[in-house]
Amino acid sequence: MQGAGGGVATALITPARAGGLKVLATSRDEHKRARALEIGAHEVFESGARLPVKVDAAMETVGRATWSHSIRSLRPGGKIVISGTTSGPNLDDAELTRIFFLQLQVIGSTMGTRGELASPGQPARRVRQQAADRPGAADGAGPRRSPRWRRATSSARSC
């Protein structure tokens, strides 16, 4: 998580850890790094510091100031999710060579649709309802994959 003191990173740390992910967070500010540890980050680092391991995914909300660090922190095949550019969108180097050689995925994400923005609780209600409607939800059978997901992944494996 880049920018551990920001709202998005702060909102993601606790559920990411609860979901079994190892959470590494960065911030320029010592107090914000300490807060990230309090709310669940496993380790914290100064912005731009070399991480001890390559990561599977990076959450990028800062933009220009941290983009290269996020890209360079990813393992081959890793993913970067970008949902903001608080330090500006114009990059000195987009790291395109690294992105294609390491087969990285860049995923853009917003909060939701305009309708969801007007009704902030709606996405959470929809997710809860989808979980309740899922076959096996009541019997604890665990997550199910949709037929569309199975088709997409089976065709991807055959490529």
Image: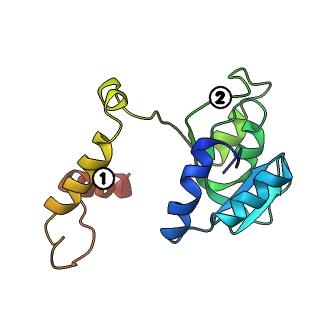
Residue 38, image x and y in percent?
69, 65
Name the foreground residue: 65 vs 8.
8
Instruction: Please say if 118 is above or below 109.
Output: above
Q: Would residue 103 be visible to someone looking at this image?
A: no
Q: Residue at x 38, y 33 (%)?
A: 112
| Disc marking residue 155 | 1
| Disc marking residue 85 | 2
Q: Residue at x 77, y 28 (%)?
A: 93
Instruction: Please say if 125 is above or below 140.
Output: above
Answer left or right for 146 relative to 85.
left
Q: Residues within 10 Å of mark 2 (few under 14, many from 20)?
A: some
Residue type at the position of mark 2: Thr
- Label 2 or label 1, whichever comes before in sequence order: 2
Estimate the spatial distance between the alpha carbons at disc 2 and disc 1, rounded to whole Å: 34 Å
Name the foreground residue: 149 vs 130.
130
Answer left or right for 11 relative to 72.
left
Write down the quadrant of residue 147 in the picture: bottom left
Name the foreground residue: 107 vs 104.
107
Q: Residue furthest top?
A: 90
Residue 140, image x and y in percent?
22, 78
